[in-house]
Amino acid sequence: MSTLFQVPSSAESALPAAARTNTKFLTIAMAGNPNAGKTTLFNSLTGLRQKVANYPGVTVERKEGVWTLDPTLPPARLIDLPGLYSFDAASIDERIARDVLTGDVSGTLQPDVIVAVVDATNLERNLYLVTQLIEMGRPLVVALTMVDMAERGRVKIDADELSRSLGFPVVPVVATRRQGLDELAAAVLRAAEEDAPVQQWQLSETAERELQRLAGSETPSQGSDRRTMRNAAMRDLYGEELPTESERRAAVEAARGRLAWTNPHWWQEPLLERYRWIETITARAVEQDAPHPPDNSKDATSFIDRFVTHKVFGLVILFLVMLLVFQTIFSWATLPMDLIDNGFGALGEIVRERLPEGLLAHLLVDGVIAGVGGVLVFLPQILLLFFFITILEDTGYMARAAFLTDRLMRGVGLHGKAFMPLLSSFACAIPGIMATRTIENPKDRLATIMIAPLMSCSARLPVYTLMIAAFFTDRKIFGFLSTGALIIMAMYLLGIAVAVGVAWVLKKTILRAPAPPLVMEMPPYRVPNPLTVLQTIWSRAFLFVKRAGTVILAISIVLWALVTFPRLETTTGANGIDKFYSPATAQAVRETGTESQGAPAPAVGGEDGDAVGAQLRQSFAGRAGRLIEPVIAPLGFDWKMGIGLISSFAARETLVSTFSIVYNVGTPKNGEEERSSSLIDAVRNARRADGSPAWTPLVAVSMMVFFVLACQCMSTVAIVRRETNSWRWPLFMVAYMLALAYVASLVTYQSGRLLGLG
Amino acid sequence: MLLSQRITETLERKTFEETESRAGESRPDCSLDELPVGASARVARVKGAGAIARRLMEMGIVPGAPVQFVKAAPLGDPLEIRVRGYHLALRRTEAQTIIVTPN
């Protein structure tokens, strides 16, 4: 087991050395451990010339940019791979990264040069991936990041010595200050001309013999491909999965058997050899003041962690962080939300004025503009959430939150990493679902995605607010507790309780899997790079708008058609339906919570309102409402509420604007306040055919329960479709949530009636 | 007040006794989760041969590597350890497969 074993390497690379830079476009891949500073380096190298997409068939982000290595040469294509610790992949991200490096992803060329991003503060573990990259036998350059931080921790790395020992270039870089970037480009260009680095360690004689046998048995060796062959043999012999081809499989199994006979821990051999070699390298290139390993118990991260993961303070801090995030989302987002609301309203008005009255104007204003506006109104909240998630991730706090909550989450069979995505879902399920990507185990991730929409998001608030304003405001419990507040809290708790139950059931049935291991790095705390944060938010938001937007547009048009056709002849055209999506109603309802109850209650009805209501009742949606009435009657709902349920599939808050049309509240004549109070009165005074009140407090509760549990959000469906890459899971989600909502409402209403509350 | 004081005293004595008994012996190998908080050790071996054992070793927990048990999470699980100069969180079940020789 000598360490300085030299594999002869001349003429081993696939292309003759000189030919490689003559090819027009160099493809360069950046590989490195998570938190090694890859993204910051990538952003500095490519600037804004990058595009984000997904790898085919999976939801792993594919980031590619243009890197000008030398102004006189054509620019190179730079691929930023997802972070990985080793080639023996644990998560989808790692598997994709490995497959890109080995050239096994369709549509992506195998990289000509690999830039290994190595964190100087964590050299030994980062070099482990480098040993596997060396084994691959592609031209390699190390970009050594965080050198300044390592020196602050009294670790001095001699980059020249490191480069000599490794046998290929090592370039220290400080991406934020653009130091070392030119040197890195030059090193990459040189590496493209030169031969791949040599592997300087070897396994035991028995193991090497088995490798040679496997490498030789595949196809006649062409000399130049010896390392590729050895690499393939390594992967088959020591990989987690056996090769599928039966002859090869038998050969590998026989080899494993022979190895196990001499050494029961045979599979550990490459791991141990790689680390042994790393230790000889670092012994030469690293100088440290402190004895090995450096005592970092007094550094900033350990100091912060003394509080942040403390038994008591840790939980308090977690609570305060949550509080801050929610407070910010619900207060700061209001202003831009109103601006978007009013902006789309104004845009609709402009279009309406410019276009001749008719179906086209109607479709544009009430279908397209209002529908898309109704979803984009949540963009400020989504952006703020992305902002917080990115900050929490990049500072390193996310790992601490997972550390603190893992035990709790394990109770329902989930992972600590599921905590933050679920928490975000209280504001909006979309960023929450997108944040589940850090969960390695696909079944855990799916279970988390499936329960995320059960967290009461902000879109449910208008519905809760309307119901409570109409039926529960003046009541107090024990003289000071407001019934409304208690009911809203009960709704949140109901969502959580059901989510826990669903997760438990899913993990016992269709998503059954052994308890996932938690082996999670707790990265040092770092100040996030503003540019990186902005670019992350931008790319996430862009993906949301692009992917969800197309589905939303389509569904908006369908819904518009449902409430518009068939047309009622007497309706005064576009005027009839235009209040259906009216952005102003959403705002009106946000204010209903504070609405005084003694407000005068005229203005129900009116000519406009009558026309609108008549058109709606006559439309497909109205007919559908009547059609489903027998089904929803046991929940306490009549057909008018049915219209609301149908239209709110697009987005929950649409219920409120639909009700203003259904109950003929009409256009506000004296400002918003009157209309919102009149909606409340309309709801209170609504009658069934037999003259009994349509709404009772019990019906209102039943309605709220339905909204807690039903998946009425097309953006969520669209994003789940994207994240799971199939229609199966989003459809399953809609179905199971609808079923739960129905049963829960049924139980609520019927048991309430039995108790005499109806 | 009095009760809490007595509990604290009992706990302290117990910790003391534990340390005493450990100091006297030749420090036999134990699993990582059995180390007292803050204690350092060297990895003797990693039990098991599955994906988890492999991942632990890839993360640098190989025989001979120095490790330190930093702390346990508020609810007792997972644990935070330090290995090769960085911090790693793992659950007790994983920590039990790591056999160490206390320093």
Image (cartoon, rainbow, N blue to C red):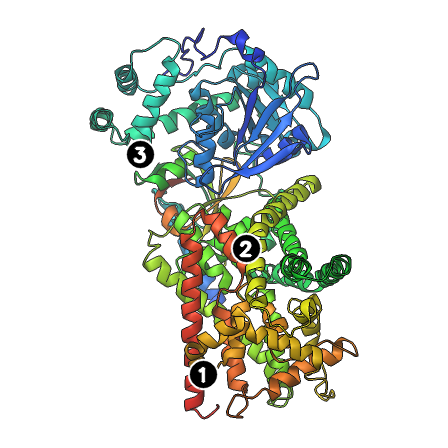
For the residues carrying marks 2 and 3, which lies nearer the camera in this image? 2
Subunit bearing disc 1:
A
Q: Report if residue A505 is visible in the image.
A: yes
Q: Which residue is mark 2?
A: A432
Q: Quadrant of the N terminus of chain A?
A: top left
Distance from Cα at disc 2 to Cα at disc 3: 33 Å
Of residues A745 and A443, the one nearer the viewer is A745
Q: Which mark is residue A749?
A: 1
Q: Amino acid at mark 2?
A: Gly
Q: Is residue B13 above or below residue A672?
A: above
CB within 8 Å, label 1 to label 3: no
Q: Amino acid at mark 1?
A: Tyr
The mark that comes first in sequence, 2 or 3, is 3
Of residues A310 and A46, the one nearer the viewer is A46
Q: Which mark is residue A241?
A: 3
| SS class, disc 1 | helix
Q: Residues within 10 Å of mark 1 (few under 14, many from 20)?
A: many
